[in-house]
Image (tube, rainbow, N blue to C red):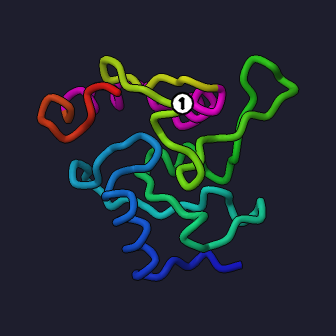
């Protein structure tokens, strides 16, 4: 399976995401680096390089997620999958409060945990962008 994402496929993925990270909602315009197109289900887990399996992600979320597809929470025997932006609505799993991205579901909790949404520097950046009108302040 190919890892190569054509310029056209990258444009489709970025436009669909409105040039925001599909995990943490950070706008690419506010970043110092280009965002990445990532495999929601990694190739090693059988994912494909198709629009249906690609998400627009900031480098932090993409790096933290890596090729993982889920994690363990309190119950060490149950794997909880991560949020899938192609199959799920962000607001069903997360909400924003005081710069924090908080979970509504186990899927949200697993994603928050591994993607490190609420590290101090990320929360402060969201608060600053929110006050400037570039990031949602609640929801």
The quarter in which the N terminus is drawn is bottom right
Is the residue 18 above or below the residue 119 in the image? below
Q: Which residue is mark 1?
A: 112
Q: Main secondary structure of the magenta part?
A: helix
Q: Label 1: few (<14), some or many (≥20) within 10 Å? A: many
What residue occupies the far left of the structure in this picture?
Answer: 132
- Can residue 21 be found in the magenta stretch? no
How many marks the image carries: the answer is 1
Residue 130: image x %, image y %?
Answer: 20, 31
Tell me: 5 left or right of 138: right
Tell me: 15 left or right of 6: left
Is the residue 104 above or below the residue 45 in the image? above
Is the residue 126 above or below the residue 87 in the image? above
The quadrant in which residue 2 appears is bottom right
Residue drawn at the location 38% of the way across and 57% of the way down = 17
Q: Which residues are magenta?
A: 106-128
Residue drawn at the location 37% of the way across and 59% of the way down = 35
Residue drawn at the location 54% of the way across and 30% of the way down = 112
What residue occupies the far right of the structure in this picture?
Answer: 77
Residue 99: image x %, image y %?
Answer: 32, 23
Tell me: 12 left or right of 52: left
SS at circle 1? helix
Q: Which of 87 and 51 lies nearest the eye of the viewer? A: 87
Q: Which of 119 and 80 lies nearest the eye of the viewer? A: 80
Is the residue 93 above or below the residue 51 in the image? above
Residue 43: image x %, image y %?
Answer: 71, 66
């Amino acid at each position: 399976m190919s890892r190569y994402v054509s310029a056209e496929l990258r444009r489709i993925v970025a436009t669909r995401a409105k040039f925001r990270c599909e995990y943490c909602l950070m706008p690419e315009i506010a970043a110092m680096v280009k965002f990445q197109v990532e495999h929601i289900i990694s190739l090693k887990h059988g994912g494909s390089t198709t629009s249906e399996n690609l998400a627009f992600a900031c480098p932090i979320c993409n790096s933290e997620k890596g090729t993982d597809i889920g994690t363990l929470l309190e119950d060490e025997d149950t794997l909880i999958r991560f949020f899938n932006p192609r199959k799920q609505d962000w607001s069903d799993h997360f909400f924003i409060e005081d710069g924090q991205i908080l979970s509504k579901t186990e899927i949200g909790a697993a994603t928050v945990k591994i993607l490190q949404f609420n590290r101090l520097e990320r929360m402060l950046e969201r608060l600053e962008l929110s006050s400037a009108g570039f990031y949602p302040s609640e929801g």
